[in-house]
Image (spheres, rainbow, N blue to C red):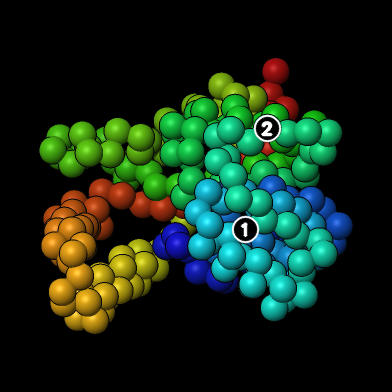
Amino acid sequence: MNPFSQEKALLAGEMARLSEGMTVIDFGCGNGTLLGIWGHSFGVCGTGIEIREEACSNAGELLAKLDLSENIHVFLADASLYYPEDETYNVAVSFGASQIWGGIPDAISSMKSFLKPDGIMIIGERYWKNDSVAAEFSREWPEIMTEYEILQSAREKGYDITRVIRSSEDEWDDYESSIWENCLDWMAENPDHPEKDEVCNYFLRIQEEYLAYGREYIGWAAYILVPSLSP
């Protein structure tokens, strides 16, 4: 559900030095894809938090299919209201979900409370490729930051960025195109649906935004954050 391939999800796990028995909490885990990849490939245990009931159901089915249900559990909850109990984790991850807390700075603050003292944070999110974005576009996306701003936010919260793994333009194109295709397929299959106009307007808007501005100005990357060693 992000412009990030399975190969790069595996690379992110390798760069975070995931290993068997490590614990992970994934905020906004969606259909459980990332937890499934990491559980199957690295043997991690952990928790997923997802607010959408259908996605939780899909995640449960995926984890059961991969024989990971005993080690990884997904809960239906609002992550912004989910608080740590006694358990803390080796890794906290948020892929395309920092808006849960209102953006990356607050996401770092909130996720930090779920981590062990030496815990690692992985944030996958959009960023401005430069700071000269057309005003009519930037106003629509006030939560997106430049990478310099992301770096400064991490440092202010007590973290260093140790790795950056970027999505390619091909991955972006594939991600966006799949949304367009799904919209068109749905409209063709539901010509008399009362929400058809809404879906059509959504399709037209996101396609125009991506081709007019998005592809040029927005990137997507996963940032691996470790506790800062700087004084």
Q: Is residue 40 above or below residue 215?
A: below
- What's the amino acid at mark 2? Tyr
Label 2 element class: loop
In the rendered image, the residue lying farthest to the right is: 21
Q: Is residue 159 left or right of residue 97?
A: right
Q: Residue 203 versus residue 137: which sits nearer the camera?
A: 203
Q: Residue 164 versus residue 201: which sits nearer the camera?
A: 201
Q: Position of residue 16 (x, y in %)?
A: 70, 52
- In this view, the mark in front (2 or 1): 2
Q: Residue 65 versus residue 122: which sits nearer the camera?
A: 65
Label 1 element class: helix
Location of residue 130 (image quadrant): top left
x 31%, y 50%: residue: 218
- Local packing at callout 2 (Cα closer than 10 Å; few below 14, some 14-19, many 20+) is few
x 57%, y 55%: residue: 29
In the rendered image, the residue lying farthest to the top is: 231
- Local packing at callout 1 (Cα closer than 10 Å; few below 14, some 14-19, many 20+) is many
Q: Is residue 76 left or right of residue 228?
A: left
x 31%, y 68%: residue: 179
Dot 2 corresponds to which residue?
A: 83
- What's the amino acid at mark 1? Ala
Q: Is residue 7 above or below residue 74?
A: below
Dot 1 corresponds to which residue?
A: 12
Q: Determine the CA span between mark 2 and mark 1.
A: 25 Å
Q: Position of residue 78 (x, y in %)?
A: 55, 41
